[in-house]
Image: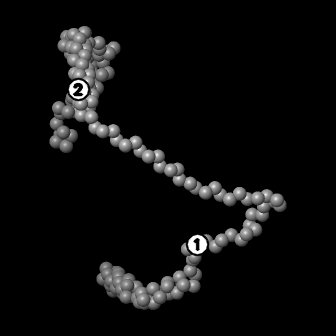
Amino acid sequence: MDFFFDNIFVIILLFVGAISQWLKARSEARQNQDPGYDPADLEEMLEEAERRHSRPAVPPPLPPNVFPQPAGSVIAPAPALRRKPREAEPAPAAFDTATELARQQQLADKLKEMKRTRGAREISDSLLPQKRPVGDVSPAAGVSLKSRLGNRRELRQAFVLKEILEKPVGLR
């Protein structure tokens, strides 16, 4: 009995080794196991099954009295589909260079006029005092830092600038 207690680790090691050898042999036997059929035989079985249970490409026609009609009713034939005759497209008019050039000149003059009026409007708009949204505080107005940070928009902008200008998080 002392022999078992003195060599318990060796006995456990032998027992674990025997179990692992048995499991390895079992898994190899599964891998080497013949599937029991030849791929050519399988292909032949599939072809024979298709021949026995072939499916028609077109469904079978319905029996004539599936939907009985009341006595004396006549079923009208389906209307034949007819195509509308194509209308002859008008022949393209002869290209007149002079009228086309005149039309393009009118468009160019109109564009110049629009650009000139837009430029004048932009100049007049720039001379007007700019309106600011309520609660917007300009840094040039000489407002204290405390009052600027009390404004939500300024506070958000301060946080964004802090994140942009600060060291990256990975380098902190």
Would you place residue 171 above or below residue 61 in this image?
A: above
Q: Position of residue 42 (x, y in %)?
A: 46, 86
Residue 22: in sight, yes or no? no
Q: Would you call the spot at circle 2 few (<14 residues within 10 Å), some (14-19), or many (20 or more)? A: few
Q: Quadrant of the C terminus?
A: top left
Residue found 58% across the figure and 55% down from its top: 81
Q: 147 or 6: which is nearer to us?
A: 147
Residue 168 position, x and y percent, is: 18, 39
SS for dot 1: loop
Q: Residue furthest right?
A: 71
Dot 1 corresponds to which residue? 58
Alpha carbon of mark 1 to alpha carbon of mark 2: how far?
A: 67 Å
The structure residue drawn at horizontal position 19% and vertical position 43%, both measured from the top left corner, is: 170
Residue 51 in sight from this viewpoint: yes
Callout 1 amino acid? Val
66 on left or right of 82 = right
Along the viewing direction, whichever of 159 and 15 lies nearer the viewer: 159
Say above or below: 153 vs 126.
below
Q: Please state the horizontal and vertical placement of residue 55, each as a whole percent of the image.
A: 57, 77
Task: Answer with left or right where residue 99 lies relative to residue 167.
Answer: right
Q: Where does the image place residue 156, in percent across and percent down from the top left?
A: 28, 26
Residue 22: image quadrant is bottom left
- Badge 1 density bin: few <14, some 14–19, many ≥20, Cα 10 Å: few
* Quadrant position of residue 67: bottom right
Q: Is residue 113 left or right of residue 50?
A: left
